[in-house]
Amino acid sequence: MTDKYAVIGNPIAHSKSPAIHAAFAKQTNQEMTYEAIQAPLGGFADTVKQLIADGYQGVNVTVPFKFDAYEMATELNVLAQHAGAVNTLMFKQSSISGHNTDGLGMVRDIEENLAISLQGKRVLLLGAGGAAQGVLHPVLDKNPAVLTVANRSVEKAVAMVEKVKAQYPSVDLAAETFDQLNNAFDVIINATSASLNKASLPISDLVFADSCLAYDMMYGQETPFMAQAKANGAQVADGLGMLVEQAAEAFLLWRGVRPEAKAVIDKMRVS
Ligand code: NDP
């Protein structure tokens, strides 16, 4: 029997995940199917139960179900625990194991594909929502010199920083509002959803250090954040690499084989 996987979201028609996983399966000669499934709002658990009954081996989970997946998992890996959200489920004999591969995917995209080490760098993380929480530990695990979290609702940034402070004593950690930012950073990550509404962030041009990387988790179009970064001489990257790399981490979990993500990122960018 062919192994079956899917991505669950609502809406889901736009998802690139089926094309990404089809490319991985072809590249690594894996016999599997992968489809996009729209679960009704409030119907995530029932959809998953049906997929398990139908013999599926695992699913990726996207907006708005990452917290439902977290609740449904009967075991959680450490990154899922830290993020408080799950984007990958593995169905086992008597358990549902929950993982969060977003942070690993983004860090791998920055360090491997863009060839920029985070160690010793001054990193600015914009946003304190699910995506920011998901990348926080994987970024800190790379030993930056500085990590500042800035958010519109600053209390969320403060809570994020307080939670990890004791665990990472060598990192200079801080929480700020956007308009308090007046230092330069080597890597600036936009994990807000402001770009979805084409909104710019009220951040000073001072945050963009010479030769910095400005990384927007959004992909598909140039965002106001990317335009501001470009105007300040930054190297700019969108979140397509993160999307493919987080999928590669899920594929590795499910299949035990790491696909070559870079080739698929290049392919997705032109398709
Ligand atoms: P959440 O809804 O959990 O968080 C949204 C964040 O954006 C919050 O920090 C919120 O601030 C902030 N925000 C929203 N609107 C504005 C605004 N107009 N000005 C300033 N801040 C704003 O979303 P997620 O964390 O799940 O997603 C964030 C982004 O990351 C999305 O664009 C998503 O598409 C992208 N993403 C990309 C992935 C990839 O693979 N490339 C993976 C996961 C996410 P506040 O707390 O004040 O409300």
Image (cartoon, helix red, strand yellow):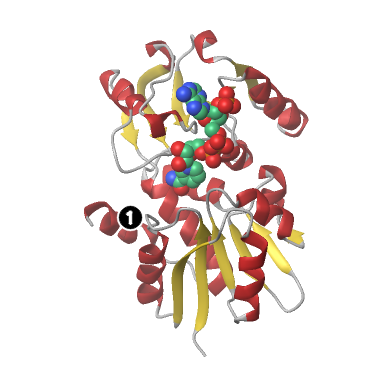
Query: Does 169 sit left or right of 62 as displayed?
Result: right
Question: For the point 33% across and 55% down, which residue is it?
Answer: 265
Residue that sits furthest to the bottom in the current view = 1
Q: How many marks?
A: 1
The residue where tag 1 is placed is: 265
Question: For the point 44% across and 70% down, which residue is it?
Answer: 35
Quadrant for the C terminus, please: bottom left
Along the line of sight, the residue nearer the viewer: 253 or 179: 179
Q: Position of residue 24 (x, y in %)?
A: 39, 69
Q: Position of residue 236 (x, y in %)?
A: 32, 32
Along the line of sight, the residue nearer the viewer: 58 or 181: 58
Along the line of sight, the residue nearer the viewer: 258 or 53: 53
Is 112 located above or below residue 122 in the figure? below
What type is the residue that disc 1 sits on?
Answer: Ile
Is 93 located above or below residue 211 in the figure? below
Label 1 near ligand 1 (CB < 8 Å): no
The answer to whether any part of residue 127 appears in the image is no
Along the line of sight, the residue nearer the viewer: 25 or 12: 12
Q: Position of residue 88 (x, y in %)?
A: 59, 60
Residue that sits furthest to the left in the current view = 270
Q: Position of residue 185 (x, y in %)?
A: 46, 21
Circle 1 crowding by C-alpha within 10 Å: few under 14, some 14–19, many from 20: some
The answer to whether any part of residue 185 appears in the image is yes
Is 21 located above or below residue 77 in the figure? below
Query: Does 7 sit left or right of 156 as displayed?
Result: left
Q: Secondary structure at mark 1?
A: helix
Question: For the point 22% across and 54% down, which residue is it?
Answer: 270
Q: Quadrant of residue 145?
A: top right
Is 36 located above or below residue 127 in the figure? below
